[in-house]
Every structure is written in structure tokens, then in C-alpha cells.
Amino acid sequence: MEKLGRLFDRKPGIINENEYFLSAVLLPLVEKGGRHHVLFEVRSCHLLRQPGEICFPGGKVEECELACPEETAVREAVEELGIKREQVSLLGSLDFLITPPGTLVYAYTGLIRDHERMFPNPNEVKEVFLVPVEYFLKNPPCKSSVEVATRYAEDFPYHMVPSSYKKEWNKRWSFPVYYYLYGERFIWGMTARILQNFVQVYYNLK
């Protein structure tokens, strides 16, 4: 019973957390003209991953940051936007995002002060732009979907499972993909999901 007693105070985690790519992002807010704006980055066209796409500052959670992923979000914002740490006021956490491809995203929001003193890193950021928060309150995202199929490896023991398990690709499920249109700006994917979550939180706070 002594060992079973340990379960009472145990805090649950994610069983296969080490199978996910752990990342953290910061949804930056800027105050301009008496209104809050969301700051977006456009990724450099020279990047191998998602070149030219719109995103928030963020990146991989390092080993030393596992206990406080918000430090990753702030660190990445400082590095990518070319700002000082003291310009960032962390406001709080948004909800976690787990994506079907295997990414676990810790999302936070923070206020960037003196945004005129911002010098984005050209190796990572092509440009930045602002959108008033009110725009997203009045314009909900559009919705599409992505289909997911699975296929077991050749060494999988098919003879041990029912014959309904096929060797070819099998469609399993689909998941929603949200996107926002702001002029010619196309905001989608994880960025749009995090933005949608922020809008829901922001709306409830108003």
C-alpha cells in the first residue's frame, strides 16, 4: 500500500512526451495608437523549413528549459526580433497545442515595449507586420481539413492481428486546419490555431 499511496499526490504527465518535438512560441502584442496589435513574423525565404510563411517567434525547448518553456518563447523572441530581454513583459500562458505530426507547443503571450527599437534577424525573419486585435475579434478564421493516413512498416507482424489491418496506406482521420486572411496575408497552421486560442482568451477577458 505504501507504493500505491504515491499515486494520490502524483501529477500526471504525457506518457510519450519524449516522442514529440517540444517547442514554445510567443504571441507578441504591441501597443500602438491606444490599441493592442498582434505582431507577426514572415519567415526568411532562405530557411529550409516553411520559408516565407507567417509565424510567431519560437523554437525548440532546450534541455535546460524543460521546467520553464516560457523562457524558450522569450529567448526566441529576443533572438528573432532583435530586441532586449527587458522589452518583453510575459503576460501569461495560452493553451498547449499538440499536433498530429508530433509537435507539442507551449504557447505564451507577451507585450513588446518600445517596438520601434526592433531589429529583426534577417537570417530568420524577412519582415514583421502588425494587425489590430479587433480585426480577429470581428473576423473568425476560415476552416478546412487535412486527411491523415497510416501504414505499418514492412516488419510489422500482420499475421498476429485481424485481417482488417491492411499493408497499404489507410485513411484514419482528418483534423481541422484554420486560416485567417488579412489583405494578402495568409495566416494558417499552428500560428492560426494559437491565434484562435488567444482570441478566445482575450474575448473572455474583455
Image (tube, rainbow, N blue to C red):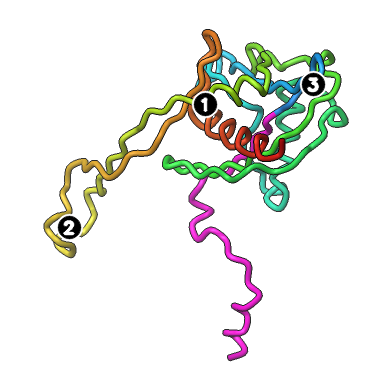
Question: Which badge, 3 or 1, is on the more N-terminal residue?
Answer: 3
Q: Which residues are magenta?
A: 1-27
In the figure, is residue 142 to the left or right of 128?
left
Can you name the residue that lies furthest to the bottom here? 1
- Tag 3 secondary structure: strand
Question: Which badge, 2 or 1, is on the more N-terminal residue?
Answer: 1
Can you name the residue that lies furthest to the top here? 184
x then y, percent, for residue 148: 31, 39
**Residue type, mark 3 in image:** Glu
Badge 2 vs badge 1, beta-carbon distance below 8 Å: no
How far is the residue under mark 3 from the one under mark 1? 22 Å
**Would you call the spot at circle 3 few (<14 residues within 10 Å), some (14-19), or many (20 or more)?**
some
**Residue type, mark 2 in image:** Tyr
Task: State the image quarter where residue 107 is shown.
Answer: top right
How far is the residue under mark 2 from the one under mark 1? 45 Å
Residue for point 53% across, 18% down: 53
Label 1, on which residue? 140
